[in-house]
Image (cartoon, rainbow, N blue to C red):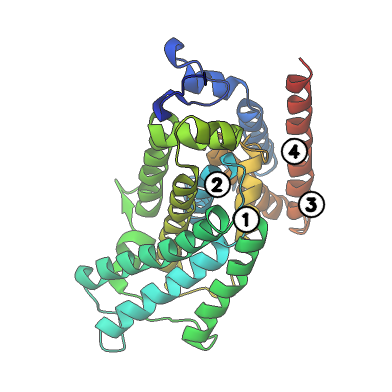
Amino acid sequence: MSAPQRSPEDVSAPTADPASGKTFRTRLAASPTLWTGLVLIVLCVLFSAVRPDAFPTLFNLQTLLVQAAPLLMLAVGMTFVIITSGIDLSVGSVLVFAGVVSAQTMEALSGGDATGAGWGVILVGLVVALLGGAAWGVLNGLLVAVARVPALIVTLGSFGAALGAAQLLTNGIDVRTVPAALRETLGTGTSFGVVPNLVILAAIVTLLAAWALHTTAFGRHTYAIGSNSEAARRAGINVSRHLVAVYALTGVLAGFAGFLSLAYFGTTTISGHSNDNLNAIAAVVLGGTSLFGGVGTILGSVIGVFIPAVLDAGFVMAGVRPFWQPIAVGAVLVAAVWLDQRRRRNRNSR
């Protein structure tokens, strides 16, 4: 007689105890999120002491938040993918592609110059950006989950294909006629005179993603697949369909990041996102998400996004050559992966 199978709702993260009501707190305590947060605080205090006239200012804080918003959207999507024990190297190129098709759509609807376009055209541009990102995400998911091609190879291929498609659509020339209303309201506008609207929108999306990951069946299935995909399948989870959904979500968020970037810069940035995929992965891993799957939090990814941003701004203000920033981030990233491997070995040896 075979053992009774559990329903998909019974599957949760390996460190969680649903009956205790401490799912999120238990996972948080088991990850290096708190330590990463402390590193971020120490960096902020250090740079504030070095440049008290420049670093701890409202302008610098606003700049850090606005510049990190598109990368945060990429990191949120990447968190879901890496928790399933996958990877997505295409998000930077998908961001560029989504920005291009969005800008060209708004331009076409405005007769060739979208500068004076209204909110109807802008909303169409947003939908096109999301659909453009979703299309690449679904393609990645189908190749990974159905065709069983390794995620590294699939997303490396779409990394080049999405960027190439964007360059073909524009002949390699950035689209610069972005609606002024989009720039003034979302790109540079603020609420209450202090908080950038771009940051508010990114924060709302991040909170929704955190809610989905940490409190819904979708999130529990994501953790379960990353912990043991075969066990999740036997528990009744449609693993292939869920993986397609996760990669589609990542694509949608990359498309949204492309729209935010379009609003902030007022132009497509075809050559400006070559390292965004690696930066997103670094942020997620720095935040405590395990490259081996099954462990991770949105909060950790949020903290991880700001470590490179703070290092970059702090080094510039302190007069340190900016070339040290990727070296410092790389060293911290390698240390984070090493600590994750040690935790896994210690847990498996018990």
Q: Mark 1 points at which residue?
A: 151
Q: Looking at the picture, does residue 202 appear above or below residue 1?
A: below
Q: What residue do we see at 73% from left, 58% from top?
A: 322
Is 345 left, or right, of 117 in this rendering?
Answer: right
Cβ–Cβ under 8 Å for marks 3 and 1: no
Q: Nearer the viewer, mark 2 or mark 3?
A: 2
Q: Which of marks 4 and 3 is in front?
A: 4
Front one among 48 and 276: 276
Is 194 left, or right, of 109 in this rendering?
Answer: right
Cβ–Cβ under 8 Å for marks 2 and 1: yes
Front one among 201 and 22: 22
Q: Which of marks 2 and 4 is in front?
A: 2
Q: Report the Cα–Cα distance between label 2 and label 1.
A: 10 Å
Type of amino acid at the residue the image marks with label 4? Val
Q: Name the residue under label 4.
A: 337
Cβ–Cβ under 8 Å for marks 1 and 4: no
Q: What residue do we see at 44% from left, 33% from top?
A: 236
At mark 1, the secondary structure is helix
